[in-house]
Image (cartoon, helix red, strand yellow):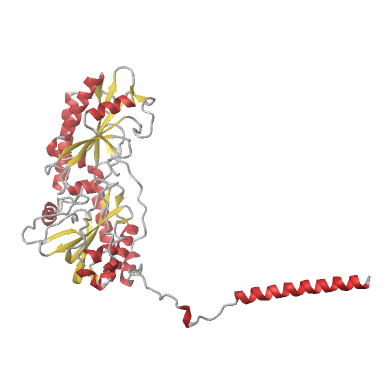
C-alpha cells in the first residue's frame, strides 16, 4: 500500500512539472523581442494623395450645414413616368504606368485614352407649380455656351476650333458648371494627371469633369494620356435631375480638388461655397420649370396585346431595346450624323428581358418624349404623334392623351403652342433643347 501511494504521488508531481514546463515554453514564445537590424522591414510610404483640408477651406465649408435634397420625378405632359436611356459614358482612367506618379512621368508618351464625361440621373417640376423666373444670362455667358456646345463621345477625342483667340471649350460650360482653374508650375502630361483623378469622377450625384489646355491646339480637352497640358480646370455640375449641388457635395468636390492640386504642385482658385450653392439652387429652379415629358397613349379597341406582339412590332419598326429591358428607344441622327434618342415606347411595367412575354398582356402602349433632350429642329413631338397614329392604324387602336381622350387637331395645336414657349425659354437661357449643355442638365 505504501508503494502504491508513493507511485501516485510521484505521478502527480511529474504531471505538475510537465504542465509548468509547457506554460514556460508558451510564455517564452509569446515574449516580444526588440527589432534587430537583420529583420529588414520595408520602409513606410506616405500616400500620394491625402484627404487633408486646408484651414481656409475648412472655414468656408462651415458656412452652410449639409443639405439633403429630396428626389423629384419628371413632370409628364402625357402619360405616366418613364425612365430615360442612361448614357454609358464614364471617365476611363488610363491603366497607367507605374512611373506615372514620378517626376519623369511628364516625359512618358503612352497610348491615348480618351476621357469623356456624361450625363446620367431624373428630376422635374411638380405638377401645377409655376416655373421660377430665372435671370437672363450675361452676353459673355451665352457666348461661352455657344463655344462649348460640342459633347465628347466615349472613346473619341475632342477636336474643337478656337474662336476670338480664346481657348475652345470641350465639355465644361460655365452655364451649368462650377469651374475651378488650376495653374500648373510647369507642363504636366496626361500620364501623370490621370492616376491622380480617382476621386474626381463624381461629387455625390453630380458629375465632375477634368480638362487640360493644349497650347498647340488652343483648346481645352478631357485629360488624355500622351498629351501635355499648360493648365487644367476641374468642374462640378451645379444641378441635374437629382437636384442642385448642395454643401455636402461641394465640400466633397473641394477636398478632392485640393488633394489633386497638392499632388501636382499646382494652385487652385477655389470658389466661395455660399455663392456656388446659391447659383446651383437658381439653376435648379430654372430647370425644374423647363423639365417636361410629353406622352401619348395607344389604346387597344379590342383584345389585349401580348408583350411578345408588342416586341415584334417595335423591333420591326427599328426601335432598340434599352439595356435594362424596360422600354424601346427610337433613335434619330443629329446634325453631325450621331444617333441620339428621340422618344421611348413602354408597355406598362413589362421588362422585355426578364418577363414571360407570352403571359404578359395589356391594352396600352405609351410613347414618351423627353422635351429638353430632343432638338427642336427635328420636330420630335410631330414625329411621336405620327408614329403613334401609325401604330393605332396597324394594331386596331386609337391615339389618346393622358386622360384617355382622343387626340384632336385642337389639342395638337395647344400642345405645339406650349412647346414653342418652352423652346424659347431654353433658347434664351443659352441651352436650346437637344444641345450638349441641355442634355447634361436634364439628366441624372
Mark yes or no: residue 172 visible.
yes
Residue lying at 20% horizontally and 47% vertically, measured from the top left: 438
Would you place residue 319 above or below residue 164 in this image?
above
- The residue closer to the viewer here, 236 or 102, is 102
Would you place residue 405 above or below residue 198 in this image?
above
Q: In the image as oriented, which residue stretches furthest toward the front?
A: 3
Relative placement, left or right, of 345 versus 11 is left
Q: Position of residue 150 (x, y in %)?
A: 15, 50
**Which quadrant holds residue 18?**
bottom right
Q: Position of residue 326 (x, y in %)?
A: 32, 35
**Which quadrant holds residue 49?**
bottom left
Q: Position of residue 261 (x, y in %)?
A: 26, 69
Which quadrant: the N terminus?
Answer: bottom right
Q: How many marks?
A: 0
- The residue closer to the viewer here, 420 or 241, is 241
- The residue closer to the viewer here, 216 or 110, is 110
**Which quadrant holds residue 409?**
top left
Residue lying at 68% horizontally and 76% vertically, measured from the top left: 24
Amino acid at each position: 500500500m505504501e508503494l502504491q501511494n508513493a507511485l501516485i504521488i510521484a505521478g502527480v508531481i511529474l504531471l505538475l512539472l510537465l504542465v509548468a514546463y509547457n506554460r514556460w515554453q508558451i510564455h517564452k514564445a509569446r515574449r516580444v523581442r526588440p527589432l534587430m537590424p537583420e529583420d529588414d522591414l520595408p520602409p513606410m510610404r506616405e500616400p500620394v494623395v491625402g484627404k487633408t483640408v486646408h484651414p481656409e477651406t475648412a472655414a468656408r465649408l462651415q458656412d452652410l450645414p449639409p443639405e439633403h435634397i429630396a428626389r423629384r420625378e419628371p413632370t409628364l405632359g402625357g402619360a405616366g413616368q418613364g425612365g430615360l436611356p442612361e448614357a454609358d459614358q464614364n471617365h476611363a482612367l488610363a491603366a497607367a504606368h507605374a512611373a506615372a506618379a514620378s517626376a519623369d512621368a511628364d516625359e512618358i508618351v503612352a497610348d491615348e485614352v480618351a476621357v469623356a464625361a456624361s450625363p446620367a440621373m431624373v428630376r422635374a417640376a411638380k405638377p401645377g407649380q409655376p416655373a421660377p423666373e430665372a435671370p437672363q444670362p450675361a452676353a459673355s455667358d451665352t457666348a461661352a455656351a455657344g463655344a462649348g456646345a460640342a459633347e465628347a463621345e466615349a472613346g473619341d477625342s475632342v477636336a474643337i476650333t478656337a474662336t476670338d483667340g480664346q481657348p475652345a471649350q470641350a465639355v465644361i460650360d460655365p452655364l451649368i458648371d462650377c469651374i475651378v482653374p488650376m495653374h500648373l508650375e510647369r507642363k504636366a502630361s496626361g500620364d501623370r494627371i490621370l492616376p491622380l483623378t480617382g476621386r474626381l469622377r463624381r461629387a455625390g450625384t453630380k458629375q465632375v469633369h477634368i480638362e487640360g489646355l493644349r497650347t498647340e491646339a488652343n483648346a481645352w480637352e478631357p485629360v488624355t494620356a500622351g498629351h501635355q497640358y499648360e493648365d487644367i480646370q476641374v468642374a462640378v455640375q451645379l444641378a441635374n435631375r437629382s437636384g442642385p449641388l448642395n454643401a455636402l457635395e461641394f465640400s466633397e468636390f473641394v477636398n478632392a480638388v485640393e488633394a489633386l492640386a497638392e499632388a501636382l504642385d499646382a494652385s487652385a482658385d477655389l470658389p466661395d461655397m455660399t455663392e456656388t450653392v446659391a447659383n446651383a439652387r437658381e439653376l435648379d429652379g430654372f430647370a425644374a420649370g423647363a423639365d417636361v415629358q410629353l406622352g401619348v397613349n395607344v389604346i387597344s379597341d379590342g383584345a389585349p396585346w401580348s408583350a411578345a406582339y408588342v416586341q415584334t412590332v417595335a423591333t420591326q419598326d427599328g426601335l432598340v431595346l434599352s439595356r435594362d429591358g424596360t422600354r424601346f428607344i427610337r433613335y434619330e441622327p443629329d446634325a453631325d450624323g450621331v444617333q441620339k434618342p428621340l422618344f421611348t415606347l413602354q408597355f406598362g411595367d413589362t421588362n422585355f428581358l426578364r418577363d414571360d412575354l407570352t403571359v404578359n398582356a395589356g391594352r396600352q402602349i405609351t410613347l414618351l418624349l423627353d422635351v429638353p433632350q430632343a432638338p427642336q429642329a427635328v420636330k420630335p413631338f410631330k414625329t411621336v404623334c405620327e408614329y403613334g397614329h401609325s401604330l393605332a392604324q396597324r394594331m386596331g387602336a386609337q391615339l389618346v392623351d393622358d386622360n384617355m381622350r382622343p387626340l384632336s387637331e385642337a389639342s395638337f395645336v395647344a400642345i405645339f403652342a406650349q412647346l414653342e414657349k418652352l423652346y424659347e425659354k431654353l433658347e434664351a437661357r443659352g441651352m436650346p433643347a437637344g444641345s450638349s449643355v441641355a442634355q447634361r442638365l436634364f439628366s441624372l
